[in-house]
Image: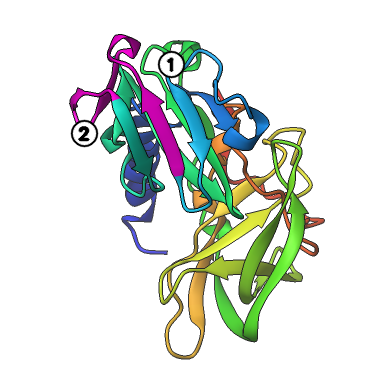
Amino acid sequence: MTSDAPDAWKQWHEQRVEKVSEPYGPLALTATHWVEDHPEGRLPDIPGTWGTDGDGVVLTAAEGDGLTLDGRPFSGEVHLAADLGPEAGSRVALGEKRLVVLVREDVWGVRVYDPAAEARRAFRGIEATAYDPRWSVPGRFTPYDDTRTVRVGNADGRERGLALAGELAFSLAGNDLTLQVARQGDGPLWAVFADATSGDTSFRFRFLFPQAPDAEGRTTVDFNRAQLPPCAFADHFICPFPPPGNRLDVAIEAGERVLS
């Protein structure tokens, strides 16, 4: 452990609290509407008519609907692709609300982010365990020959595919453990995991983002930076549950645990 590791963790934790409480952070999400669930084209509490053409969302609005597109009052019809940037920069807005277009497995939806959301007003912080070097250990990533997609339950009650890139092996508290992890390109790894504290002293599952491994697959598995998933902040996220093998028998008493 370097002498500045606890200070670096404290800064990370403070930045996490700041990030999730931003005007269009996860606490601001008040709804996720799947367009196919509303064949008449009317989404709850959102003006306009919303449909899909297979390649995106088609929005039809009148002048009196109060919608804006790219910052200007909008009426007429527009084809919308998925919003890929920050939620605050979504193309469509309704006053201070941002209407974010998303797609999951060819199913199109609209998310509503409202800075005045009750969850954001009530937020008091994230309970997290102070840095402990015992929870930061060496790990080795072994990629699969080909990406494996497993079907897992999601927080919204639906089942979706989770693409897994390989396995991350490490030793913790005398136990040899592995996690199946996802990865985009050459970037960091992503593990969805549960442990013996899940649903008790911590949220029912958490996320971990180990740094990108080196050419030999070496990285650091630092559970001090275990994160609450977005669905811990708002019920309208669709977080995947841990895939098979990612429910650890050990108690990971580290990282973010629950909301304050």
Which residue is under mark 2? 70
Quarter in which the N terminus is drawn? bottom left
Which residue is under mark 1? 47
> In the rendering, at what x and y percent does residue 219 appear?
48, 75
What residue is shown at x 34% (from left), y 32% (from top)?
77
Quarter in which the C terminus is drawn? top right
When asked about the image quadrant of residue 158, the answer is top right
129 or 227: which is nearer to us? 227
Dot 2 crowding, Cα within 10 Å, few <14, some 14–19, many 20+: few
Q: Is residue 66 left or right of residue 105?
A: left
Residues at marks 1 and 2, CA–CA distance in whole angstroms: 17 Å
Q: Residue 227: in sight, yes or no?
A: yes
18 or 238: which is nearer to us? 238
Residue 58 inside the magenta-drawn segment: yes
What residue is shown at x 41% (from left), y 32% (from top)?
59
Mark 1 or mark 2: whose residue is earlier in sequence: 1
User: For numbered disc 1, what is the local secondary structure?
Assistant: loop
Tell me: residue 247, above or below residue 120: below
Task: Choose mark 1 or mark 2, whichever is in front.
Answer: 1
Segment colored magenta: 57-75
Q: Mark 2 belongs to which amino acid?
A: Asp
Q: Is residue 196 left or right of residue 141?
A: right
Residue 149 inside the magenta-drawn segment: no
What residue is shown at x 43% (from left), y 89% (from top)?
215
